[in-house]
Amino acid sequence: MYNKEFQTIFTYAKDKTDETEILLSAGNSFSVKINKQNVESFNYSDSKGIGVRVIKNGKVGYAYTEKFDEETFKNIVDEAIENAEYTEDDDVVIMEKYPENTDSPNVYSKELDKVDVLEKIQLAKDLEKYAKETDKRVFNVPFAVFGDGKSYSRVANSKGLDREDTQNYAYAYVGALSEEKDDKRMGIEFHITRNFGEFNAKKMAEESVKKSTDLLNSKPAETGKSAVVFNNEMMAAMLATFSGIFNAKSVQEGRSLLKGKIGQKIANNKVTIIDDGLHPDGFSTSAFDNEGYPTERTVLIENGVLKTYLHNTITARKDGVKSTGNGSRGYKGTLNISTSNFLIEAGEHKEADLFTKHDKIIEIVSLQGMHSGANPISGDFSLGAQGFLWENGKRQHSLKPFTVSGNFLQMLSGVEAIADNFKFDMSSNGAPSILINELNISG
């Protein structure tokens, strides 16, 4: 696709640049939100853009356009060349025809594209309907949403590299608000898939209501130190919040607490953290990154030992290693690094077994303030939380909102047990439920 556009840019840039790379992104997205069985919002959007990255006299310049015509394509080449003249970045950039992945991940479903819009709207309506019917304590369903999207990307450079990728996805989530004795709590359930038949509105609604009503009739949490179990959703949220410490660019710029720790034990030996660009169940799965470099399964922490960082080709060259296939940029932006399917590997315990390891354990099922209450540079966090008190392996009661605080690396070192209930969130961060030996609780 878009062969004429790519050819126009390469032909014009051939005698003007030393090397040229083109990144094209196109796609569409749809979402519908239901309120009182009526469509509250209905959104459909298309997007398309081309970005160029050029090398001229050892300098790198970027430019982009969302207007597709020959004159504009020539203009962005000229603009990128001009931008290269004024760049102060001394990073060495070398474009190559990188090898192709032998694995071709299945990230596109033709059947999903065929689902009628009325079926999508009905699913969202059913989410709201079932949530309201499940329990009389539910007084509002602020979220009953279905959405899907399709994306196409192509990256090519003047060394002969040319890769393209098409993928799609669908998601739904429902949030139920319940109330009892002036205690109001929210429960949210989500599902993301490429198979529309997997959506079960009744089951999702019931689960969101259970999450909400279980938190009612709460009691204050005791202030002090406590063993803590993060459920799989909240452990994934914690992992995502501190994902930047594995970014090689941050490490090289002195903005990561992992600088200088390759080969060191930084977590309990039960902990293995992986970024897997080829994960069959992930939704950031692709055969190549935004440089066209092949993605891979990168083990960052293995049995507690830091093995590597996440690299693009620029940071890899600086460290004398190969890229991990995590080069990231949109057509509007410059090259950076991002995670793909980022996860903590599952353990062997059943989740219920985790709660038998201490006489008292606090289970955390909701976190707030991830952006303001967590410092990715120091690793410190202080977050609003909701959850339950467990005693002698049995859940006793829910807790009024409390604060949990600690340090991310110390938390990884304090891992005592890992469950087998691995789950991805909607941003391709995944984790099982995990028991931490001790964190600070403020009720």
Image (cartoon, helix red, strand yellow):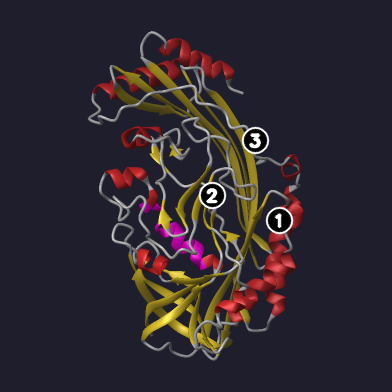
Q: Which residues are magenta?
A: 234-245
The residue carrying mark 3 is 104
Which residue is depicted at the point 41% across and 59% down? 241
* Residue 400 lies in the magenta stretch: no
Label 1 crowd (10 A; few <14 / some 14-19 / many >=20): many
Q: Secondary structure at mark 1?
A: helix
Q: Residue furthest top?
A: 15
The residue carrying mark 2 is 341
The residue carrying mark 1 is 121
**Mark with earlier residue (3, 2):** 3
- Image quarter hosting the C terminus: bottom left
* Residue 237 lies in the magenta stretch: yes
Identified by mark 2, the residue type is Asn
Q: Position of residue 374 (x, y in %)?
A: 35, 64
Label 3 crowd (10 A; few <14 / some 14-19 / many >=20): few
Q: Position of residue 108 (x, y in %)?
A: 68, 40
Which quadrant of the structure image shows residue 212? bottom right
Q: Indicate left or right for 237 with 149 as reference.
A: left
- The total of numbered circles placed on residues is 3
- CA separation, marks 3 and 2? 16 Å
